[in-house]
């Protein structure tokens, strides 16, 4: 199965702080979880994207949070720069990859203002999480593409096997 995966989960240093969120090397994950991640990565056709880089942002970059989830959507960075257009562009590029390649499922990094599928920071830069989606995760789900995060590997695996 084809899966779109956040580049940082695959070990690319695409995060705002120029680090990765590599599941395989992250001590927070048990060996069995890393093994499942590697099995999923090796047994499927993986497409990688960092929507923020695809949207024109660099590495490193200032932290960003969504301050309006409804239209007009607004994303700012911690220097108060409006970077909404970069996030919208990155989301569109993620969707285009899915549509062009028939991708029906994504494994995206949790809590990211682009990739988060369940919760994101609340827009006050005070580390408070709210039940909202990142802009890329939201656009994918609005178009029928199922998004899982790195703590939902078992659910992702079940989804892949049952499709
Ligand atoms: Fe990772 Fe997504 Fe953030 Fe890029 S935008 S660094 S892929 S969480």
Image (cartoon, helix red, strand yellow):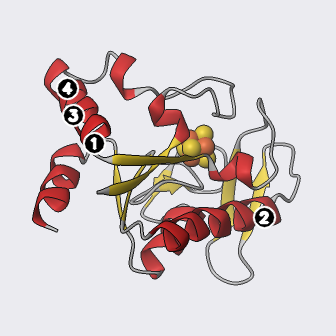
Q: Position of residue 129 (x, y in %)?
A: 47, 51
Pick whichever, 45 or 70, lies toward us. Answer: 45
Determine the CA span between mark 4 and mark 3.
6 Å
The residue indicated by pointer 4 is 35
The residue indicated by pointer 2 is 84
Q: Give the residue displayed 78% in from the left and 48% down from the top.
A: 77
Q: Give the residue displayed 19% in from the left and 26% down from the top.
A: 35
Tell me, yes or no, whether the two marked residues, 4 and 3, touch with CB atoms within 8 Å: yes
Tell me, yes or no, whether the two marked residues, 3 and 1, touch with CB atoms within 8 Å: no
Crowding at dot 2, Cα within 10 Å, few <14 / some 14-19 / many 20+, comes out as many
Precedes in sequence: disc 4 or disc 1: 4
| For residue 69, side relative to residue 157 (left or right) | right
Determine the CA span between mark 2 and mark 4.
36 Å
Pick whichever, 93 or 26, lies toward us. Answer: 93
- Which quadrant: the N terminus? bottom left
Precedes in sequence: disc 2 or disc 4: 4
Determine which quarter of the picture holds residue 125.
Answer: top right
State which image quarter holds ligand 1. Answer: top right
Please, what secondary structure does the residue beneath circle 4 have?
helix
Please, what secondary structure does the residue beneath circle 2 have?
helix
Residue farthest bottom in this picture: 71
Please, what secondary structure does the residue beneath circle 1 have?
loop
The residue indicated by pointer 1 is 151
- Relative to 66, is 30 above or below? above
| For residue 47, side relative to residue 163 (left or right) | right
Pick whichever, 73 or 22, lies toward us. Answer: 22
- Relative to 70, is 17 above or below? above
Precedes in sequence: disc 3 or disc 1: 3
């Amino acid at each position: 199965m084809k899966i779109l995966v956040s580049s940082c989960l695959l070990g690319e240093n695409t995060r705002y702080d120029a680090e990765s969120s590599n599941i395989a090397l992250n001590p927070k994950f048990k060996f069995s979880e890393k093994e499942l991640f590697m099995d999923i990565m090796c047994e499927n056709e993986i497409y990688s994207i960092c929507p923020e880089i695809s949207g024109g942002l660099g590495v490193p970059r200032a932290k960003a949070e969504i301050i309006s989830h409804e239209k007009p959507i607004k994303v700012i960075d911690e220097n108060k720069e409006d970077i909404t257009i970069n996030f919208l562009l990155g989301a569109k590029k993620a969707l285009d990859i899915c549509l062009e390649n028939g991708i029906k499922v994504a494994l995206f990094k949790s809590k990211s203002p682009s990739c988060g599928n369940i919760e994101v920071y609340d827009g006050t830069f005070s580390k408070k999480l709210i039940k909202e989606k990142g802009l890329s995760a939201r656009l994918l789900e609005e178009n029928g593409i199922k998004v899982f995060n790195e703590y939902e590997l078992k659910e992702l695996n079940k989804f892949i096997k049952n499709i």
